[in-house]
Amino acid sequence: GDQEVVLGTEQGMAIRFHERDVRSMGRSTYGVKGIALRDGDKVVDMVVVDPSASLLTACENGYGKRTGFDEYRTQSRGGIGLINIKTSERNGKVVALLDVRDEDEVMMITSQGMVIRTPINTIRPIGRNTQGVRLIALNEADKLVAVARLVKEEGGEDGAETGQAGAEADEGQSPSAGGSPAGDK
């Protein structure tokens, strides 16, 4: 194919490479290395690059950032990548990467069950190697665990989420497409 992907890690690294660098294999194979991981690091998300979108990175302590894909140069698959976000004590670990557009909204879910819906256009774009801004205010023991992108349907109604990130996505904790959480704007 002609698309590119970005892999993001828990410790804030990211690598962008062409999908053609990943050869086709059978389902019983081990696959190929997408990014060289540091000790204790792991891949948390993958995003297909859309030049008209930007990359939203969210961290467990409620901080994150929105950065244009053009700030991530294309590299060879299997490299160490670039610093995507500084995973300081303030930010915590990366939990999600999403491709987002100005007209989208995101739904953020915390470990204590808080759900917040935020328009993307309220998160200003900033550079790649930065700490980011506050996406959600959390209680002291709370952590951000999942982020989903909500897209407006053509009729103006909210559509189902098209992206879900975080380890909890596999455990059935993704937001429902129908209904609206209390406290929506």
Image (tube, rainbow, N blue to C red):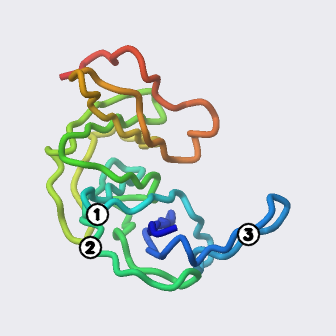
Residues at circles 1 and 2 in contact by the CB criterion of under 8 Å: yes
Mark 1 or mark 2, whichever is nearer to me = 1
| Residue kind at label 2, given as amino acid type | Asp
Residue at the image point whose x is 26% and y is 20% from the top: 157
At mark 3, the secondary structure is loop
User: Which quadrant would residue 70 be assigned to in this image?
Assistant: bottom left
Q: Is residue 52 left or right of residue 115?
A: left
Q: Which residue is mark 2?
A: 70
The image position of residue 167, as x and y in percent, is 58, 47
- The mark found on residue 51 in the picture is 1
Q: Is residue 36 left or right of residue 156?
A: right
Q: Real-space Cα distance between discs 3 and 1?
A: 27 Å
| Residue kind at label 1, given as amino acid type | Pro
Direction right: furthest residue: 28
Which is more N-terminal, label 2 or label 3? 3
Crowd tier of the residue under label 3, counting other residues whose Cα lies within 10 Å: few below 14, some 14–19, many 20 or above:
few
Residue at the image point whose x is 45% and y is 58% from the top: 47
User: Which quadrant would residue 43 be assigned to in this image?
Assistant: bottom right
Which is more N-terminal, label 1 or label 3? 3
Q: Height in image: 53 above or below 152?
A: below
At mark 1, the secondary structure is loop
**The C terminus lies in quadrant:** top left
| Residue kind at label 3, given as amino acid type | Gly
